[in-house]
Image (spheres, helix red, strand yellow):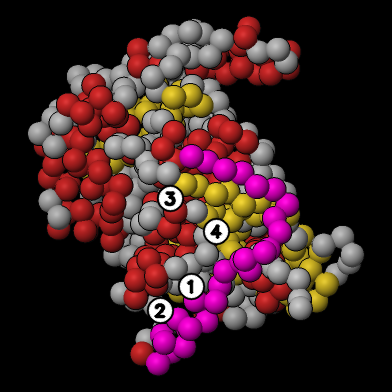
Amino acid sequence: MSTPKTLYEKLVASHTVCELDDRGHVLLYVDRQVLNEYTSPQAFSGLREANRKLWRPNTSLAVVDHVNSTAPKRVAVEPQEGGALQVNYFAENCRDFGIELFDILDSRQGIEHVVAPEQGFILPGMVVAAGDSHTTTYGALGALGFGIGTSEIEHLLATQTLIYKKLKTMRVTIQGELALGITSKDVIMELIRKIGADGATGYAIEFCGPTVDSMSVEARMTVCNMAVEAGARGAYMAPDETVFEYLKSKPRVPKDALWEQALAQWRLLKSDPDAVFDKDVHIDASEVKPLVTWGTSPDQVVDISSRVPNPLEQANKAEQKAMQRALNYMGLAANTPMQDISISHAFIGSCTNARIEDLREVAKIVKGKKVAPGVRAMIVPGSSNVRAQADAEGLSAIFIDAGFEWRQSGCSMCLAMNDDVLSPGDRCASSTNRNFEGRQGAGVRTHLMSPAMAAAAAITGHLCDIRSWEVAK
Ligand SMILES: CC(C)[C@H](C(=O)O)[C@@H](O)C(=O)O
Ligand code: SF4
């Protein structure tokens, strides 16, 4: 009998063209890649210089997302606008190399990790690479997605392969029921709290267990998306009926007999029962609290009902110093109750938490309420399709009535590469995935949390416990 294998090992094995050495390097075939205007220019320039063509142009999908404006009225970029150079060069490259592009005015435009699944471009069992670390998101569909650098993009476009180092495997088993108001965002933040921001470096994570099984595909995407903040360059769940149901209606999935054939194959995509993982982690979902970051790394995170931690209680001197530095940057004093922290901004957006289910949750929280005086709150839908759907469901009317800005889609204030930049000292409750120094603008203080928590903070003007909110409803 052959050795039992994890799904990760099966996916890598089925895409291995050849082994390159005995240290785990293989030449890996990549099924599909998603391109953005921000990380692809040098790759295209390299191809142009070497006079190379794309090996399989129709395996690429190109989306403008990082630098575009999210101003409510959408217009094409003008040559003099910031980011226009990247957007225009991107369009030129897609035209010259024969790649399908969702440009700013396209009704399918949006953040790549929201758009690609929405289009049915990512299917179970695929290997997908892109010049963006949050490509792990696709693991929610049972695909192996990971981020690559710009020279790797060039290699990939020319050959449809990559030199890939096989990862170790980690199984994260999640069981128990989430309490009212607790979301999959809190679950992934709990994992990061537990294992640290480099706790999964060198690993691919398989998420499993009853809690994962009962999550929607969108909730699973949040988990796989943010797993990279624990260092994982691969994070997935075995695809199940929930995934197949989600995919069924998407525009680009195989149809009719091909669908049935695909389904039969996809149902085989799971780890063998006795497969051995290099590491096992368990999470009791019933114990997960609403989490919020206090520092400048996603693992500097606490339960909303607790206090800003005190570095002096840390035995490790280096850790103490890092905590103090984070507190200084964040303008926070140790032992302050987290709920006493006032905010100036709230941002609901990003590929972590700006899908339609997230926006529905936000609408439930803010309906009939008003954004606190002095707070600027914005909602940036994950894609133009999500925006249209939120309009159709009446969600955007609720947001606008409550005083939120309802904007066009893009990465926006998740990393502030367009005009959506905050000012030094601003403090933002954010549904995003990274709270690094300067992430939302120089000197800006970012607190990561679930979209529901960010919405509640916008209304009250300070960080607050979604559980008391849920009870009060
Ligand atoms: C711009 C891109 C390289 C980057 C990433 O890789 O994730 C960005 O999307 C981010 O979230 O920091
Ligand atoms: S929304 Fe944020 S995390 Fe996602 S791809 Fe854009 S910048 Fe990166």
- Quarter holding the C terminus is top left
How far across and down, in percent of the image, does residue 138 sit?
50, 61
Membership of 268 in magenta stretch = yes
Q: Is residue 52 left or right of residue 416?
A: right
Q: Which residue occupies 68% across, 63% down?
A: 275
- Most foreground residue, 221 or 46: 221
Q: Residues within 10 Å of mark 2 (few under 14, many from 20)?
A: some
- Secondary structure beneath dot 4 equals strand
Q: Amino acid at mark 2?
A: Val
Q: Is residue 389 left or right of residue 197?
A: left
- The nearer-to-camera label among 3 and 1 is 3
Q: Which residue occupies 65% across, 13% down?
A: 314
**Is residue 435 shown above or below 443?**
below
Residue wearing tag 4: 236
- Residue range of the region highlighted in magenta in the rendering: 257-284
Q: Amino acid at mark 4?
A: Tyr
Label 3 – label 1 distance at C-alpha: 22 Å
Residue wearing tag 3: 211
- Secondary structure beneath dot 2 equals loop
- Secondary structure beneath dot 3 equals helix
Residue wearing tag 1: 123
Q: Residues within 10 Å of mark 4 (few under 14, many from 20)?
A: many
Label 1 – label 2 distance at C-alpha: 8 Å
Q: Between disc 3 and disc 4, whose residue precedes?
A: 3
Label 3 – label 4 distance at C-alpha: 14 Å
- Quarter holding the N terminus is bottom right
Q: Between disc 3 and disc 1, whose residue precedes?
A: 1
- The nearer-to-camera label among 3 and 4 is 3
Residue wearing tag 2: 253
